[in-house]
Amino acid sequence: MSDNSKLYEGKAKILYRTGDPEILLADFKDDATAFNAQKRGSIQNKGIINCSISSKLFEQLEANGIKTHYIDSPAPNQMRVKAVKILPIEVVVRNIAAGSLCQQTGLTLGTVLAKPLVEFYYKNDELGDPLLTPDRLQLMKLATEEQVDSITHLALKINKFLQGFWQQCNITLVDFKLEFGLDSQQQLLLADEISPDTCRLWDIAQDDPNLRVMDKDRFRRDLGNIENAYQEVLQRVLKV
Ligand code: UDP
């Protein structure tokens, strides 16, 4: 395999090989998709914004004892990461009811959950990323029981850190999605990104249900001012 060749192109990032098989380069794109890629568009500077936000969060998570795939960020829209085998699971943590939780349970948007909810979804676009039960996780051999326990523990720890971080930005962390991978030593690492694409973020200073939205819901729900909202999130993150 030649160096610096494209390994994989996803909806939001392109992964390139480097001279070192243990290291990949992630290039964050401005492309935006929603509803299982049925809605497509582009958000100006999203690649730079999401890479910058994710880099800062991964650095701080590492400093708080969470192992991540992050190495460094050689350019504003590029991240060097440890090569991992991504588990085909989307781990969602929720503090406040929104999105599919409201649609599937009838809970009112904005209901504060008594304790954080950790959910596992099967990362499979053809099947529409269905919600998994613990038994289905085992049936499909998507992760061992030990890995599921570790991921749940890590997800709750990450949630505690992120809630505090976003609060310093005057932002409420409603919910978010995480992905985990295994490195060549079978070590579990937090991977992918943490950004307004993968978190629901509400401006604490705004009560209006549309004005408060600072994340990809602006794109999903055609709320306008998408670029401004993403930029504003980055500005607040850089001040922490
Ligand atoms: N999420 C994501 N990628 C996905 C699905 C969800 O990053 O493929 C994030 C989403 O941005 C939100 C959280 O996970 O912060 C919970 O999403 P939900 O299940 O409510 O689905 P949605 O309403 O986004 O379809």
Image (spheres, helix red, strand yellow):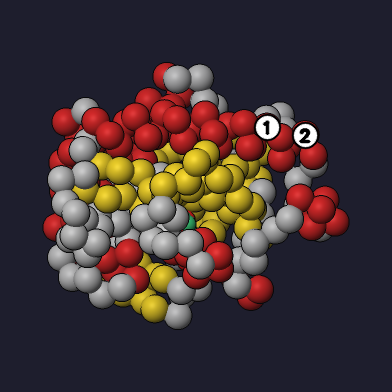
**Callout 2: CB less than 8 Å from ligand 1:** no
Residue found 48% across the figure and 32% down from its top? 158
Total labels: the figure holds 2
Residue 59 rendering spot, x and y as whole percentages: 38, 27
Three-letter code for the amino acid on which mark 2 is drawn: Glu
The circle drawn on residue 146 is: 2
Does 234 appear above or below 13?
above
Residue 96 rendering spot, x and y as whole percentages: 42, 49
Residue found 15% across the figure and 65% down from its top? 225
Query: Is 16 positioned to the left or the right of 199 in the image?
Result: right
Query: Is 21 positioned to the left or the right of 174 in the image?
Result: right
Mark 1 and mark 2: Cα distance apart in space: 6 Å
Crowding near the residue tagged with mark 1, few <14, some 14–19, many ≥20 C-alpha atoms within 10 Å: few
Q: Please identify the quarter of the rendering in which residue 217 is found.
A: bottom left
Three-letter code for the amino acid on which mark 1 is drawn: Ser
Crowding near the residue tagged with mark 2, few <14, some 14–19, many ≥20 C-alpha atoms within 10 Å: few
Query: Is 162 positioned to the left or the right of 181 in the image?
Result: left
